[in-house]
Image (cartoon, rainbow, N blue to C red):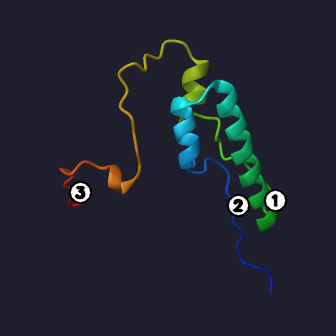
């Protein structure tokens, strides 16, 4: 019996730790090479899973809005707050998570 529902993933994948570190410390050429390697890996996995549409995981984007902020003049990002979405990175005073 064919599946009743189909799901494909389009959009961002979580960036591997090596890619996050390279974004902080690697040269642009080294970063591009590492991005290429991880993009090839996620494309191969999507092909293996039989996805009809594939994404590069948006590994070249700094964040979800970087394409927009890079294309539009007038953004002052000098005072932005870094975000980390891992539970273990939350401060000990985080009431919501009980730490």
The residue at which mark 2 appears reads as: 8
Q: Which residue is drawn at 19% across and 55% down?
A: 95
Cα distance in 3D space between marks 1 and 2 = 8 Å
Q: Which of marks 3 and 1 is nearer the N terminus?
A: 1
> In the visual, does 26 lie left or right of 82?
right
Which residue is more in the foreground, 67 or 43? 43
Q: Where is residue 90 drawn, in percent x and y?
A: 30, 50
The residue at which mark 3 appears reads as: 96
The residue at which mark 1 appears reads as: 52
Element carrying mark 3: loop
Q: Which residue is drawn at 56% across and 50% down?
A: 14
Tell me, yes or no, if residue 89 can be seen here: yes
Element carrying mark 1: loop
Cα distance in 3D space between marks 3 and 1 = 39 Å
Q: Residue 42 carries which label?
A: none
Q: Residues within 10 Å of mark 1 (few under 14, many from 20)?
A: few
Callout 1 touching callout 2 (CB < 8 Å) = yes
> In the visual, does 18 lie left or right of 50?
left
**If the image is split into quadrants, where does the C terminus sit?**
bottom left
Cα distance in 3D space between marks 3 and 2 = 32 Å
């Amino acid at each position: 019996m064919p599946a009743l529902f189909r799901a494909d993933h389009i959009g961002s994948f979580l960036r591997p730790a090596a890619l996050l570190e390279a974004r902080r410390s690697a040269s642009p050429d080294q970063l591009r090479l590492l991005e290429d390697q991880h993009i090839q890996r996620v494309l191969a996995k999507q092909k293996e899973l039989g996805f009809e549409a594939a994404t590069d995981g948006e590994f070249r984007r700094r964040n979800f809005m970087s394409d927009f902020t890079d294309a539009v003049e007038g953004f002052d990002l000098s005072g932005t707050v870094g975000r980390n979405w891992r539970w273990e990175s939350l401060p000990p005073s985080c009431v919501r998570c009980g730490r």
